[in-house]
Amino acid sequence: MTPSDYQDQEVKAPKVEVVDSYDTGDDGITGAARKYWLQFQQWFDKLPLPAKGAVAIAVLFVTFSILTQVLRFVASLVTLAILLVILYGVYRVFLRQNKDS
């Protein structure tokens, strides 16, 4: 065998594709969210400076409004849970005691 025959028989290493562990692909929710985020960034970069400030203030206002509503909802759930525990305690102490007598 000649050296060129050995080269033909050599197993070539397969090409390795580097995969980013944070990349989930272009499909699915993350791909759609990434697409809209890039569109928003391109739109935002084209705005003049005063408009960028106005958009930033509006985004902060909307974000804090949503956060306030979520916190109010959580507070109402906590209040409801406390009320249910109190009512169950009243039931155990007064009403259940009458049934045992």
Image: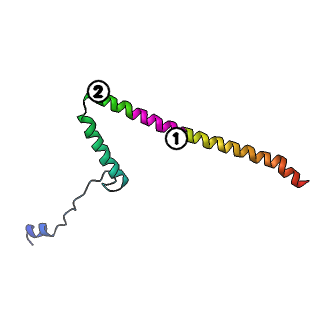
Give the x, y percent position of residue 41: 28, 39
Along the line of sight, the residue nearer the viewer: 24 or 78 = 78
Is residue 62 in the magenta section? Answer: yes
Give the x, y percent position of residue 82: 68, 42
**Image height of 20 relative to 41, above or below:** below
| Residue in the picture at 33% in, 51% down | 32
Q: Quadrant of residue 76?
A: top right
| Residue in the picture at 29% in, 30% down | 51
Give the x, y percent position of residue 79: 65, 40
| Residue in the picture at 32% in, 56% down | 27
Residue 22 visible? The answer is no
Question: In the image as oriented, which residue stretches furthest toward the right?
Answer: 101
The answer to whether marks 1 and 2 mark residues whose Cβ atoms lie closer than 8 Å is no
Horizontal side of 94 relative to 25 (left or right) equals right
Depth check, mark 1 against mark 2: the one in front is 2
Sequence-first disc among 1 and 2: 2
Q: Give amino acid for label 2.
A: Pro
| Element carrying mark 1 | helix
Q: Quadrant of the N terminus?
A: bottom left
Q: Which mark is residue 70?
A: 1
Give the x, y percent position of residue 49: 27, 27
Q: Which mark is residue 40?
A: none
Count the labels in the image. 2
Residue 15 visible? The answer is yes
Horizontal side of 7 relative to 41 (left or right) equals left
The residue pinned by badge 2 equals 50
Along the line of sight, the residue nearer the viewer: 100 or 73 = 73
**Image height of 26 relative to 82, above or below:** below
The residue segment tinted magenta is: 59-71
Magenta stretch secondary structure, dominant: helix
| Residue in the picture at 26% in, 39% down | 43
